[in-house]
Image (cartoon, helix red, strand yellow):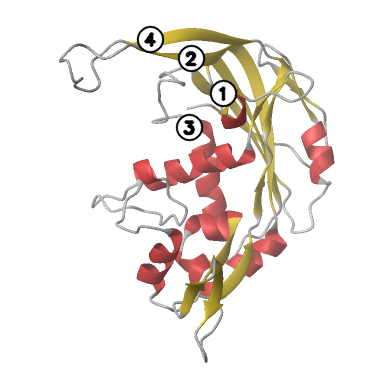
Amino acid sequence: MATLENKIDFAVILRATKANPNGDPLNGNRPRIDYDGYGEISDVCIKRKIRDRLMEAKDGQGNYKYSVFVQCDERKVDDAKSLKDRADKALKDKLTLESACKQWFDVRAFGQVFAFKSANSKKKKGEEVSEPGGDTGVSIPVRGPVSVHSAFSIEPIHSESIQITKSVNSETTADGKKSSDTMGMKHRVDKGVYVFYGSINPQLAERTGFSNEDAEVIKSILPKLFENDESSARPAGSMEVLKVYWWNHGCKAGKYSSAKVHRSLTVNPDGSYSISDLEGLNPEIIDGF
């Protein structure tokens, strides 16, 4: 497949309704906010959801269509115990930038740093050392062409917290009586409209082999980013993609800077939007799934 021919910018408007879009583990798993009170969904969280949607795609024979390197344990589709284990099993000690990008969709899209210790290294006084004559491991940085920003709410958000109680008998007690109830907290955003932006760079795509077809896969995933992503923190239907905007510049260098393209989109608190005219560049507008 030919590598990506044209620069692409994109934007996604999404809405959270009585959900926790992205909990902050350093703040009791409350919804992430910046210092001005605007809600935030990290770029890592967004890329995790893209990877999860990639892992759900199957062909007509029931085989997975896309191979993903960074898999979360709860959705893992192989028996690899670590990233190094996955790399070793897939490439059998033939890990290179080219082989990794060809093997895994997320590597050629987002990039990856392969930094693994040598099989000959061993622990000595709390430090990693190598056996005489052994190598020190492998370190291969891959810079991907697909960049994704964090999502931020259009207005400051209001976070609500409720206390919950677990009253089931978790463990058998010594006296045979019911164990004590445990208390906990759940947090949610009552409502909020968020937007995030991204770009796909053709020059970096040449390095990883990211193709026009790969870009179409990303475009097809963004409208259904939160499908099959339900949890207690994000009940079904509480997270919704409203619109996806896809600017194809028609050339490698791009007709405008990504900053100018992204600024052309104005999003209102109710999810409505307006787009400033950019001569020769109009977005494809896609409804959420």
Give residue 233's position: percent from left, percent from top: 46, 21
Asked whether the beta carbons under mark 1 and mark 2 sit within 8 Å of each other, the answer is yes
Q: Quadrant of residue 56?
A: top left
Q: Indicate the quadrant where residue 93 lies.
A: bottom left
Farthest residue, direction bottom: 133
* Amino acid on which the number 4 mark rests in the picture: Thr
Residue nearest the observer in this picture, 121 or 277: 121
State yes or no: discs 3 and 4 in contact (Cβ < 8 Å): no
In this rendered view, identify the residue nearer to me: 110 or 184: 184
Residue ID at (49%, 76%):
118
What residue is pinned by disc 4? 165
Q: Distance between the residues labelled 4 and 1?
A: 16 Å
Q: Which mark is residue 28?
A: 1
Among the two numbered marks 3 and 4 on one chain, the one whose residue lies closer to the N terminus: 4
**Horizontal side of residue 8 vs 232, given as left or right:** right
Please tell me whether mark 1 sits on a helix, a strand or a loop. loop
Residue 26: x %, y % from top left: 61, 30
Question: Type of residue at label 1?
Answer: Gly
**Residue 217: image x %, image y %?**
50, 48
Q: In this view, does 60 lie above or below 128?
A: above
